[in-house]
Amino acid sequence: MTINEASKKYNIPIKILKEYESWGLCGEVKKVMGSWQYDKSDIERLSTIMTLHDIGFTNEEVEKYMRLLLEENSTQKERIEMLNKKRNGTLDEIHFKEKQLDRLDYLRFEMQRNSQK
């Protein structure tokens, strides 16, 4: 499957596919007649990359995670630590936003209460 076919079929931006190729992680990818040919294992790795991007990993974090993933079980602890760090950061953001909502609701409540006097 070519880069354009993979992009269309799996809704993966060309930019992500080119980034993936540039990392040299395409062990199973073959360059045939001037274009990359993706197989099932490449698509599975690309799915992981898209998930990592979706949860907020930077390009550098994605590349590091994927390099560790290719080493498999010996890096599981480090990959879990990366995921836990991202999870904790996301929870911190959620808690901050909850506090903002509480303050916003308080201000709205006070305005409504004052307008009824």
Image: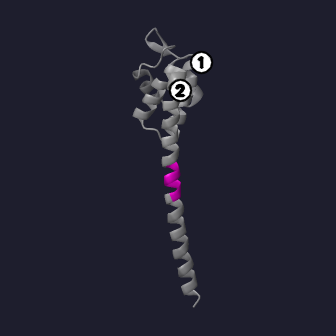
* Residue 51: % across, % down: 55, 35
Q: Assign a secondary structure to mark 2.
A: helix
Q: Is residue 33 above or below residue 95?
A: above
Q: Amino acid at mark 2?
A: Leu
> In the rendered structure, which amino acid carries the disc numbered 1?
Lys
The crowd level at tag 1 (other Cα within 10 Å; few <14, some 14-19, many 20+) is: few
Q: Quarter-wise, where is residue 114 in the image?
A: bottom right
User: What secondary structure prevails in the magenta region?
Assistant: helix
Q: Position of residue 93 (x, y in %)?
A: 49, 53
Choose the circle earlier in sequence order: 2 or 1. Answer: 1
Q: Which residues are magenta?
A: 90-95
User: Residue shown at 57%/81% (left/top)?
Assistant: 112
Q: Quadrant of residue 64?
A: top left
Where residue 111 sits: x, y (%)?
53, 81
Report the Cα–Cα distance between label 2 and label 1. Answer: 10 Å
State the residue at coordinates (55%, 86%): 115
* Disc marking residue 72: none
Q: Badge 2 local density, few (<14 within 10 Å), some, or many (20+)?
A: some
- Which residue is under mark 1? 40
Q: Nearer the viewer, residue 35 or 25?
A: 25
Q: Residue furthest top?
A: 33
Percent x, y of residue 49: 51, 30
Query: Above or below — where is 86 with respect to 65?
Result: below
Can the viewer see residue 5 in this picture? no
Q: Looking at the image, which residue is at 57% across and 18% down?
A: 41
| Residue 101 located within the stretch drawn in magenta | no
- Residue drawn where x is 43% and y is 25% of the image: 18
| Residue 46: mark in rendering | 2
* Residue closer to the observer: 9 or 103: 103
Q: Is residue 39 visible?
A: yes
